Image (cartoon, grey):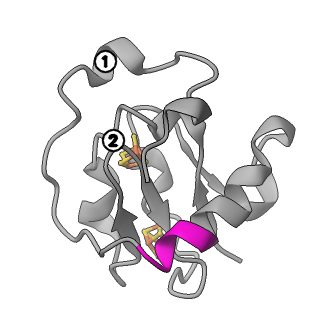
């Protein structure tokens, strides 16, 4: 089991989540974070930390976000690890809750 970051992180990237992870399994891209499913120990600590409510347990990912399970696994392989809070994207609060952000994902 792993936790998964979903669409509402895109262009928000608050990074509050990385501070609590005991095994440093967050990986950072230009405007999105992912969790490496091979590193996550399912501790649950990150889920309540996300101001965008973008983190779900793998078995609770909403139906319309299921593709993010594979996307986290894929991108975690090539993106570098992020272990410290670095502040949100500049206009994170404006993007928080906006639908259909997947097309804006930068790799
Ligand atoms: Fe890290 Fe725990 Fe979140 Fe997994 S559930 S990403 S181990 S904080
Ligand atoms: Fe993204 Fe939420 Fe972490 S917006 S960077 S999953 S705190």
* CB of mark 2 near ligand 2 (< 8 Å): yes
Tell me residue 9's x, y (percent).
46, 39
Q: Quadrant of residue 45?
A: bottom left
The answer for how far apart the CA atoms under marks 2 and 1 are is 10 Å
Q: Is residue 93 left or right of residue 42?
A: left
Of callouts 2 and 1, which one flags the residue occurring earlier in the amino acid sequence?
A: 2
Measured along the vertical axis of the image, is residue 40 above or below residue 20?
A: below
- Residue 76 is a magenta residue: yes
Dot 1 crowding, Cα within 10 Å, few <14, some 14–19, many 20+: some
Residue at the image position 43 percent from the left and 21 percent from the top: 96
Q: Secondary structure at mark 2?
A: loop
- Residue 24 is a magenta residue: no
- In this view of the protein, which residue sits in the foreground, 13 or 80? 80
Q: Which mark is residue 19?
A: none
Residue at the image position 80 percent from the left and 50 percent from the top: 66
Residue underneath mark 2? 13
Tell me residue 29's x, y (percent).
35, 57
Measured along the vertical axis of the image, is residue 45 above or below residue 98?
A: below
Dot 2 crowding, Cα within 10 Å, few <14, some 14–19, many 20+: many
Range shown magenta:
74-78
Q: How many marks?
A: 2
Tell me residue 102's x, y (percent).
60, 35
Q: Residue furthest right?
A: 63
Q: Secondary structure at mark 1?
A: helix
Residue underneath mark 1? 93
The main secondary structure of the magenta stretch is helix
Quadrant for the N terminus, please: bottom right
């Amino acid at each position: 089991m792993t936790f998964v970051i979903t669409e509402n992180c895109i262009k928000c990237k608050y990074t509050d989540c990385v501070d609590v992870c005991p095994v440093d399994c967050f990986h950072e891209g230009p405007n999105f974070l992912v969790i490496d499913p091979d590193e996550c120990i399912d501790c649950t600590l990150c889920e309540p930390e996300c101001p965008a409510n973008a983190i779900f347990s793998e078995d609770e990912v909403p139906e319309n976000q299921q593709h993010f399970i594979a996307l986290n696994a894929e991108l975690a392989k090539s993106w570098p690890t992020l272990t410290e809070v670095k502040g949100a994207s500049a206009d994170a609060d404006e993007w928080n809750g906006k639908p259909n952000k997947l097309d804006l994902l930068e790799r």
